[in-house]
Image (cartoon, coloured by chain):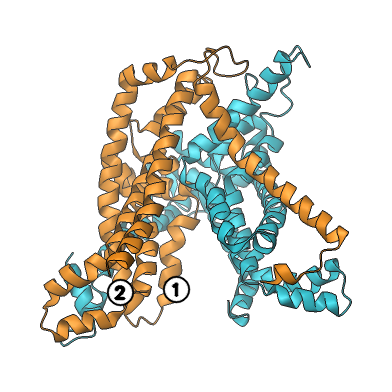
Chain colours: A orange, B cyan
Amino acid sequence: MAREAEIVSPRAGLVRGLLAGWAGLVYLFLFAPIALLVAFSFNANKYGTFPFTGWTTDWYAQVLHNYQIKDALYTSLKVAALVTLISTAVGTAAAFPLVRSRLPFRTGIRVGMTLPIMIPGLLIGISLLVLFTGTFHLQLSPETAVIGQSVYTTPFVLLIVAARLQGFDVALERAAADLGANTFNRLRYVVLPLIAPAVFAGALFAFTLSLDEFIITLFLIGGHNTLPIYIYTQVKFGITPEVNALASLLLAASLILIALAFAVPAAVRRLRRVTA
Amino acid sequence: MGRGQEVRGGGGHVLVSSLGQYAGFLPALVLYGVFFAAPLGLIVAYSFWKVVDYNVVHDWTLDNYHYFFSVSTYVSTFWATIWVSLVATAVTIAVAFPFAYWLARYVPKRLQRLLLLLVILPFWTSYLLRVYSWLNILGEQGAINRFLQWTHVTDRPVSFFLYDRPAVVLVLVYLYFPFAALTLYASLERFDWDQFKAARDLGATSATAIRKILLPQVRPGIVTSVIFVFIPILGEYLAPQLVGGTKGVMIGNLVVNFFSGAQYTRGAAAALLIAALIVILLVLFRRSLEVKDAYGA
């Protein structure tokens, strides 16, 4: 690396120090709002803000006993489970031809598939609203929200599984075929075990994204609430410590899920290296 | 959907049929055809249709666009959206570039991944909560005001920060910083710092080396991050809604207002203006995006 060889003049040292300070401010900027949110959720002050008047877990107890929140949690989990199922199946299936077939417009398709991530969720939400209510004359429900969220989450699964397939040695599969394995057995014993960690990670990402999704859901869920929608309806009336507590719980859930999504494939790889 | 088919196709074996190769795309094709492409097409059509007696009539007309540009507050919102998006994107890049530069150049390789992960982490938490957390800070009952009163700096809430465009820009920078940091880091990380050193050895100042050696090579990365930040901001709804108040309104808020008032065709036209801005942006930057290939990136 060039770093060691560099001659460090006092000025270069100053620039480096300034940049490091800047980076420190960036991390403060990124995490201070979240840290404050969590801090306020344990603050006895009933306005959910400064000053700190004492430590309490009352707000969490309130959250656990709020039936509206229980309802919203149930809807959130149901929607997230369905979204995970759909986007994992659709994304994984599409990853194979994307990586392996000799498609003429592969780059174009890859870009097209990432479009739902790039374009504002607002556009996905209203366009599906028009389709469901205007064309199909459907009643809005958690199921219509599932479809909208799946449009947004599937590309994530697709990209994660495709990345894994790219590093997959097709010769392994050919060898299995030469040894007499049929299509099903090749899939069952060779392909799936190798891509399973990526599929699992993709599923966890999809689940987390669904749990946190707001704007598409807002348009498509009708009279129901998911947790983010419930929080949104509460925020309109001002900040409450109860919402801070609920928000902290939702944050913790996301962070745990994402940590798992990053850690599990790495752990599987390490384990395989040890046992191999 | 039988996944066996794709494997068969991909494996390049006897059972391969040229169609089986693409079978895996089928579910995705249905999902994206019926629930992504078709609805977007429908929005385009709606924006050119009109409403008669609360029913959408398939008469082609430009009325919805005429209407949008005949109301002065909508027009000023249109320009304000472009302005806010430009400023927020510029600030985001200005904050993220020195950070990514520091990360790629001065941090040991092993630490880089961890520090980058920390930056992306907020992206995986709830978007609503990231906006909401600022309400906790900026609001009249928010942390800043409470803190100022608590410490007796002021005795009355200062509404200086909330419910105006600066607050919207601040929150937008917060929301989209991870995108910018990630893409900028990706291009800075590939940069060969020996070239930088060579330029210095040949007598260039650091500033000149950055301008003449570094920037041209990371330009595709900068363009990519501009696109990744600018596009979602154009369609932003929640940040202006929660921290912008009436002074921070953007097109996204107009779209939502139209739709919640069941004015579907007008809402579609406003939404299509966002889409048009996105297309213009992509066309404008098309050349710069192609440069990417020239660098073999």
B141 or A131, nearer to the observer: B141
Question: What amino acid does circle 1 point to?
Answer: Gly
| Rendered position, B146 above or below B212 | above
Q: Outermost residue, front direction?
A: A274
> What chain does mark 2 sit on?
A
The answer to whether the residues at label 2 and label 1 have Cβ atoms under 8 Å apart is no
Q: Earlier in the sequence, mark 2 or mark 1?
A: 2
Q: Residue at x 61, y 75 (%)?
A: B292
| Rendered position, B170 above or below B203 | above
Q: Which mark is residue A108?
A: 1
Q: Quadrant of residue A166?
A: bottom left
Q: Residue at x 54, y 28 (%)?
A: A37
- In the picture, the quarter occupied by the C terminus of chain A is bottom left
> What chain does mark 1 sit on?
A
Q: Does residue A214 appear anywhere in the picture?
A: yes
The residue identified by callout 2 is: A97
Question: What amino acid does circle 2 point to?
Answer: Pro
- In the picture, the quarter occupied by the N terminus of chain A is bottom right
Q: Are marks 2 and 1 on the same chain?
A: yes
x, y percent for residue B242: 57, 31
Label 2: few (<14), some or many (≥20) within 10 Å? many
Q: Does residue B273 appear anywhere in the picture?
A: no
Q: CA distance from mark 2 to mark 1?
A: 14 Å
Assign a secondary structure to mark 1.
helix
Give the mark count: 2
